[in-house]
Structures are given as structure tokens and as C-alpha cells.
Image (tube, rainbow, N blue to C red):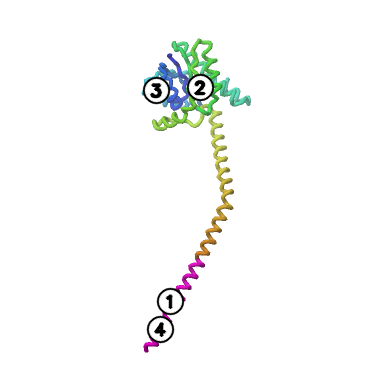
Amino acid sequence: MKILLHACCGPCSLEPVRLLRQEGHELAIAYANSNIHPENEYRHRLETLLAWADEEGIPVIEGPYDVDGWMKTAGRIQREGGPREERCRACYRGRLEQTAAFAAERGFEGMGTTLSVSPYQYTNIIAEEVRRACRPFGLEPVVRDFRPYYENATKRSREMGMYRQNFCGCAFSAKEAEDERRERKAAREAERARRAAERAPIEAQLEEQRRQKAARQAEYDRKQHAKREMRRKMREQAKAAQQQDRQ
């Protein structure tokens, strides 16, 4: 099948492309990601994707970078205090609808996305939105859960020296990712402090045992030394007595 595969970046494309090619599909990639902020981040991800796709011989279609349009949909949900899940759904929807339109215009038979390789995304919602985007155009929805291949994708992209981002893409996710990293760091530090507190009395007890053992050893050594000195003196006295007897 001829598939247009929406991709958010190069690293997330590695395993989906490999697996779909193994199934015998003909692939092209759509880079439709108006959510990515700031623009230099958008360009960096695109350049990484283009360099890899060129080596693989995979065509890449770039959609318009419409930040204002994204802010009026997914961004509006965030500004109005809506749940993160609904913001992400709106974000998926806009990007996948755009990709489905590209697919229909260019004669593709199916449409899918690399988003489901990430364990940090809402995989079920992604599947729903892929099917929803494909329906009006009569496209075959290519729905896969690529999460089991995330670690392999991470390993491969690092070995290839690919640029790897540390947040999903939008300005909101960048802040959320930073907050989550701080929370994880604080949790790790709290756990280390808890374990240290648990170990403290044990370490104190072990240290006291080591001190007592060292004291016993020192007392034993002192007594042994005293015995050796006593035996030495006795030998010297006996030797002196023998010499006097011979005289």
C-alpha cells in the first residue's frame, strides 16, 4: 500500500518506517507540525528528518507552519484551562487532518503517524484521530502501536548522532516536560534522603561495632605485647643467672 506517514521528528520515524517497509508498503513522510515551538526548534527537527529521509530515499512533504492556527485550536484549550488530554487531541486532529488531505491530493491509499512510537503520547487517542482523519477521504487508516520499539528507536537515533529533543513540541509541553523533570529530580532526591535516613542507624551501629572490634584488637595486641615482653625479660634473667653460676 502507498502510505503517507505523518512524522514529528527523525528519531520517532526510524522504527515505524523500518516496520512498515518490512510489511512491503511504499512510504512518504508528511512533516505537518505547527505545534512545534519555537521556530528554530521546528527547523532543527525538520532538517534532521530531511537528512535521514534523503539517505533512505523517502520523500518528505512539508506542511505550512501555521502557529496562529494551532494556537486557535489546541492552544485555546490550554489557555482556557482545559485538560492536557483534550489539548493533545486537538493537536493530533489538526496535524492528521492536514496529512490526510495531502494524502488524498497526492494519490496515497493510506495514512498513519509515527506519534504512537512515544510512550509519552496518548496512543488510543492517536488511533481514534487517525481513523477520523482518514474517513472523509476514503483512506485506509494505518494504526499501529509502535511503543514496544521506542527503546530501539532511541538507541538507533543516538548511535546515528540524530538530534533528539526533550519535549513533545509545543511551548506548553516544553514547560510541562521541565516541570516533570524537576518533579522526578525532587522525587529522586527525596528517595535518596529517605534511604540515607534508613541507613543512618544501621551505619552508626556498624561503625560502633567496628570501633569496639578495633578496641578489642588493640587490647589483645597490648596484652600479647606485654606477654612477649615478660617472656623476654624472663629469658634475659635466666641467661644472666646461668652466667653467674658459671663464674
Q: Is residue 183 visible?
A: yes
The answer to if 11 sits in the magenta stretch is no
The one nearer the camera, 135 or 152, is 152
Q: Nearer the viewer, mark 3 or mark 1?
A: 1
Which residue bears the numbered disc 1? 232
Residue at the location (56% across, 50% down)?
199
Q: Secondary structure at mark 1?
A: helix
Which residue bears the numbered disc 3? 53
Q: CA distance from mark 1 to mark 2?
A: 94 Å
Q: Nearer the viewer, mark 1 or mark 2?
A: 1
Q: Secondary structure at mark 2?
A: loop
Q: Nearer the viewer, mark 4 or mark 3?
A: 4
| Coordinates of residue 65 in the picture (x, y in percent) | 49, 20
Q: Kindly indicate the quadrant of the structure image that contains residue 171.
A: top right
Amino acid carrying label 3: it is Ala
Magenta region: which residues? Answer: 218-247
Instruction: State which tag comes first along the sequence, 1 or 4.
Output: 1
| Coordinates of residue 184 in the picture (x, y in percent) | 55, 37
Quadrant in the picture for the C terminus: bottom left
Q: CA distance from mark 3 to mark 1?
A: 89 Å
Q: CA distance from mark 4 to mark 2?
A: 106 Å
- Up-down: is 199 above or below 160? below
Which mark identifies residue 152?
A: none
